[in-house]
Amino acid sequence: MGPDSHLERVFVSGEDGSLARALIVRLRALGSEIINDKLTKGWHGETSWGFEVDALDRNLPEVLAVLKPTMIINTAALVMSKRCEIDPTRALLCNTMTALNMAHCYLAANKPFFVHFGTTAYYDINGKRPYTEASRIIPSTLYGHTKYMGEVMINHHVDSRNLLVLRPGFVFGGLRDTSSAIMEIIRSPLTFVDPEVRLDRSYYKDFVYIDDFAEMALRLITNRVYGTWHVASGTPRQWGSALDMLRYLGIKSKIIERPEMDYLGDQILDCKNTLDLTDYEPLSLEQGIALANTEFRRSLHG
């Protein structure tokens, strides 16, 4: 089996999300066959399913036992803290039970390489910065709690040397980005809705543009790295700097600022190991915001 054999047939859960799509484009460019959680082709002989199977379907492990993916990438999640608070049942299903089902898929599919998307929302907001991958975990939000429970399930079922856990920074950009405050503000002149931001201007966040995240993640995946890794720029900036850049680009929307518990504290991540291993230099915050704005405006003209 060759060094890239885990890239041959890849199952991706949560394929509608921006992080998943950015990775899928790159994997296909490498020649990977992508299977997603909207399976429509038959796996029982030549019989077609005739319906969709999502990442929570209890029959999915049986499906993947037949399709035999060489890698499973679990990106499925309810990523916005506010949505989790409004619908805690959905948060538990998307962030915890989906992870458990993916672990069952891993076992049924003969233990392929497994990539799980975690979050940095696990860490103790009163803990020492910068956060490392081994920093103390005390989730302060429902989003953090449900995501962490999902990661615990993954760690329990998946062999440690067969598991890559990615914990992203504050990812933004891309036309499918529906969760970042930056893209909400960029879109706001057309939505005629004043964006509501839960961040305090003074807090630091490790912003990372979507394509930079995907490229660093891909380099970890292709090298079949295992363990837990932060994926971010390694250059935390104050939220106020992002607002200044958005104003500089001419976005004049009224921004409703309501800092809340889930964003209290600085998100300062130790990314040295990831940046050294991937040998990658991410865009600056200003470059990423300018590119995100340009791509959005181009999309308006077809």
Image: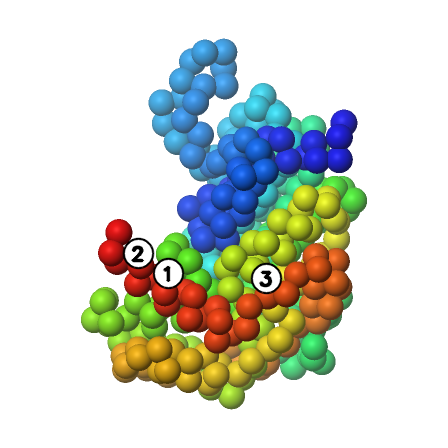
Q: Residue at x 68, y 44 (%)?
A: 222
Residue carrying label 2: 299
Instruction: Look at label 2 and name its amino acid.
Output: Ser
Q: Residue at x 31, y 74 (%)?
A: 195
Secondary structure found at label 2: helix
Q: Mark 1 and mark 2 in contact (Cβ < 8 Å)? A: yes
Which residue occupies the extreme bottom position in the image? 202
Q: Residue at x 52, y 34 (%)?
A: 34
Q: Earlier in the sequence, mark 2 or mark 3?
A: 3
User: How packed is label 1: few (under 14 Cα within 10 Å), some, or many (20 or more)?
Assistant: some
Spatial separation of the CA atoms under disc 2 and disc 1: 6 Å
Q: Which mark is residue 295?
A: 1
Residue 85 location, x and y as percent? 43, 65
Q: Mark 1 and mark 3 in contact (Cβ < 8 Å)? A: no
Q: Split into 4 quadrants, where in the image is the N terminus? A: top right
Spatial separation of the CA atoms under disc 3 and disc 1: 22 Å
Secondary structure found at label 1: helix
User: How packed is label 3: few (under 14 Cα within 10 Å), some, or many (20 or more)?
Assistant: many
Q: Earlier in the sequence, mark 3 or mark 1?
A: 3
Residue carrying label 3: 168
Instruction: Look at label 3 and name its amino acid.
Output: Pro
